[in-house]
Amino acid sequence: MGGIASKNQLRMSFLRWALVTVPLVLLLGFASGRSVPAGDQNGWYVALVKPALTPPGWVFPVAWSLLYILIGVALAVVLNARGARSRGLAVALFAVQLALNLAWTPVFFGAHRIGLALALLAVLLVTAIATTLVFGRIRPLAAWLMLPYLIWVSFAGMLTLGIQRLNPDAQALVPGAHTSQML
């Protein structure tokens, strides 16, 4: 059985990857979002002065869910590209940028470290751009699927920068959150 795979076999292989990557990325994103009180459930965040472009609170979980689905599919596309050069690098970069992404919520909402959260977003954006470029060399579709994520991470950076500028003493507003919201 050393022959070339049929289109149906390739499609099924992709679907198997997607059935793992999409729920996994969604689950990790959910766990990060629930690791500390976030959004309107966080007294510190509610007390902050926010930039005018800050969307309503319900937008964030909807946007992140859609973005996690897209990047999970992008990862599945790359994982399905067996034998592709740079596939290992692409997956490693994806893992690094996802870890940075998942660290942001506890840093911002839990530790109230806006400056550190902003630095984390900058490194995340650079790593996500690198991931997207490597994804694009393997499968252009995977890079296109990453594009909304890059735009949203950039927007999150602008919001975080705006919050930092509008709230120079933000860390002192309310004590840090140390309780998990997982249940």
Image: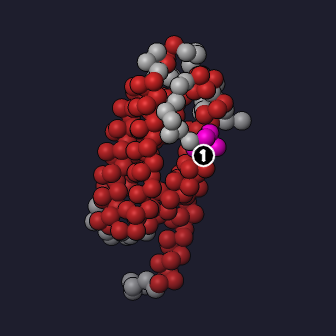
Residue receiving disc 1: 59
Say which amino acid is labelled 1: Val
Name the one closer to the observer, 33 or 167. 167
User: Residue at image x 30%, y 52%?
Assistant: 130
In the image, the segment drawn in magenta is 56-60
Q: Give the camera-side residue of 53 and 171.
A: 53
Residue 139 appears in the rendering: yes
What main secondary structure does the magenta stretch of the protein show? loop
> Can you give x and y, in whole percent of width and height, for residue 61 in the image?
60, 45
User: Percent position (x, y) of residue 151?
Assistant: 42, 51
Residue depicted at x 29% and y 65%: 137
Quadrant position of the C terminus in the picture: top right
Residue 73 % position (x, y)? 49, 62
Residue in the image at 50% along x and 73% along y: 13
Query: Is residue 58 part of the magenta span, yes or no?
Result: yes
Quarter occupied by the N terminus:
bottom left
Is residue 65 within the magenta segment?
no
Hey, which quadrant is residue 176 in on the image?
Answer: top right
Near mark 1 (Cα within 10 A), the count class, few <14, some 14-19 or many ≥20, is few
Q: Secondary structure at mark 1?
A: helix
